[in-house]
Every structure is written in C-alpha cells, then in structure tokens.
Image (cartoon, rainbow, N blue to C red):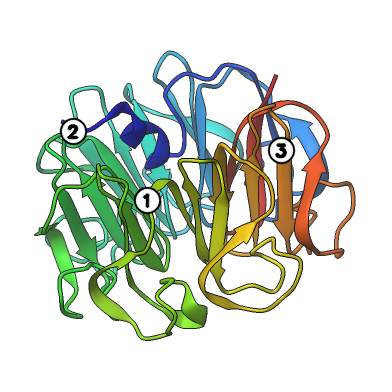
Amino acid sequence: MLSDKLLSTSLHFPTSIGPDLFVWGDNGTGQLGLGDTIKRSSPVQLAGTWASVSLGADFCSGLKPDGSLWVWGRNEYGPMGLGDTLRRSSPVQIAGTWTAVSLGYRMLAAIKADGSMWVSGRNSFGQLGLGNYVDRSSPVQIAGTWAAVSIGSSFSAALKADGSMWTWGGNGTGQLGLGDTVRRSSPVQLAGTWNSVKIYSHSSALKADGSLWLWGFAGNGKLGDGITINRSSPIQVTGTWSVIGTGGNTHALRGDGSLWTWGYNSGRLGVGDTIDRSSPTQVAGTWVSVNPANNHSSALKADGSLWIWGTNGFGQLGLGDSGVNRSSPVQIPGTWKQLAMGSSNSNAAFRF
C-alpha cells in the first residue's frame, strides 16, 4: 500500500486545508479567478472556502470541502470539462464529487472517492489515456482504479494503490520511462514500485526507500546526473529524499529539511546566481515543502514562512512589483499553509 505521503506530494495538496486562499501573478485569461484579467503583483483573496487548489497552463482548479470541483481561466481544447472551450474568469463547477485533481498543458485529470479517474482537454499525443487522439471537452473515464495522478506538457503519469506506476502520452524524449521514445495513448506500466510522482517536461518519482529517480528531457541538466543526455528509463539521483518538485527544473528535499535544486536557472534555482546546474546544489535554509513552476519557485519553512524566487515579469513573485527578478529566496509576508504554482506565471496559496 502507498503511504499517506503520496497523496500530499503527487497531488499538490492533502484534501483538507481550510485557511483563506490567495492568488497573484499573470491573469491574462482570468486564471486568478477574480472575475477579471488584471494581473496582480501581491496576493489577493479568492472568495469562497477551499480545500485544495491546482494550477495548469493559464487555467486553475479548486476543490471545496464538500468535494465539489471548480475551474477557471483558459479553456482551449476544453480541459475544464464543461462541454465547451469558453474561458472563465470566475470559478465554475464541474459536476460530481471529487477527491483530487491535477492540471497540465490544456488538460485536466481528476479522481473521485471510488478511485475512478476522469480526464478532459487536449489529446493530440494520447495524453488523456483513452486509446485515441480525440480531444474531449467533457470528462471521460480512464479504465482502472487510481490513487494519484500527475500530468505535464504532453504526457501523464498515475499511481495505483499497489504502488504501480502507469504512464502515457507523448514520449519524444523518453519521458514515459519505458525505454523507448514511442508515444502511448493508453496507460502502460512502468517497472518498479513507487511512492510518488511529479512530471512537467521531464519526470521524477520517489520509491518507499527514499530513492529519487528521473527520466525524460535532460536539457540544462534537469535530470541531475551531471550531463544533458535525455533518458528513456529512470536513473537514480544520489541520496535519500523525501519530497520532489518538478517544473522547468528540479527541486527536492531530504529528510533533514535541506533543499536541493538543479537544471535550468536564470535565477530559478534560488542559489544566488543564474548558472545552470546539472547536479543537485543546496539552497540555504531548512524547509518543509517546495513547489517549482516553469519560471519561478517557492518553498515553505516549518514556521509557515513562504519564500519565493525566480523571474517576475508578471508579478508572480507576489512581492508588490514586476520585472524585478530574484535569484535567492525572498519572503512573502504572512504565515502560509501551502502554495500551488502554474506554468503561466500564476500562483495560489493558503494563508492562516
């Protein structure tokens, strides 16, 4: 059986949080859910009571304590599952009762309490896992019973309760981990037993023994093995790890709370410079969670302080300005519970 840690690391949040939800950053498609398209460079509260939130490419979703699922933002290809492709700047409900959701590039996957998984959106690479390449604007069920899901740019990965991992979709850089570059339109099992998975343009996963494995696109050294050669099968990163975060680069926490980053930088690694790293490099401090996006990253400390760094063209750092990048962690005022970050330079966080 999978540990409770899986549900909190591979699905962005546990199913019950409760504090107020704040959003900020880019809002060109209404992805902040505030009823307009005005970007925000400081956190602004989103109305309602929320249990969890997930961000994708220009659109967002949130779960309420009653299990209702709400979506907003860009809706090209119909990832919102509302039967159309119209964008929304305020939350709109998807029918059903849900326990978890993950967003990717123009795609949504969500799990119900019975373990059924439902997908909608773009499917040109077979990333919906339905055995074809037809886009869906309403939720369609993937066969099987599932425990967790993570979706990326053009591919998906999900875990069953027995720890088996299944991948599908685009595979041009080996991001499915199956030893080849052949795309799949239906789930295929990846060898091994796994505890959590996170994907973006590459894949990372943890086993129960704390070993960290990466595969797929290796540009700028994001696989952490000291080179930049794509891998179509999982390779192990030295060390024992507890939490992973995968975005435009890779972030991971060890059991002692130390944070290590590698891959594409331009200030996004939080190590005080803009030099890419192809091996793990430590970020100063002791941390409890981390969440990288495409252009910026964030992490929480045990005292609830939230720290953020990277590029800031849309005010996505939440520091009251835009255009001023940070290459080292800077604190956002307040005490925070958790943060979700989107590939479209938007953010959402729960604050006490």
| Disc 3 from disc 1: Cα separation | 24 Å
Q: Compared to 323, does 321 lie above or below?
A: above
Q: Please name whichever residue, 306 or 41, is drawn nearer the observer in this view of the structure.
A: 306
Is 57 placed left or right of 181 in the picture?
right
Task: Find disc 3 in the rendering and name its residue.
Answer: 306
Q: Earlier in the sequence, mark 1 or mark 2?
A: 2
Q: Amino acid at mark 3?
A: Leu
Residue at horizontal 65%, vertical 35%? Answer: 301
Q: Looking at the image, is mark 1 or mark 2 nearer the viewer?
A: 1
Per the image, the residue denoted by label 2 is 116
Q: What amino acid is found at the position of numbered circle 1 in the picture?
A: Thr
Q: Kindly indicate the quadrant of the structure image that contains residue 180.
A: bottom left
Residue 157 occupies quadrant: bottom left
Q: Residue 40 location in percent, x, y?
A: 80, 46
Q: Mark 2: which secondary structure?
A: loop
CA separation in Å, label 1 and label 2: 32 Å
Sequence-wise, the earlier of marks 3 and 2 is 2
Between 277 and 81, the one nearer to me in the picture: 277
Answer whether labels 1 and 2 touch (C-beta < 8 Å).
Answer: no
Residue plotted at (41% across, 39% down): 9
Q: Secondary structure at mark 3?
A: strand
Residue identifier under label 1:
240
Amino acid at circle 2:
Ser
Between marks 3 and 1 in the image, the one whose residue lies nearer the viewer: 1
Q: Position of residue 1 (x, y in %)?
A: 15, 30
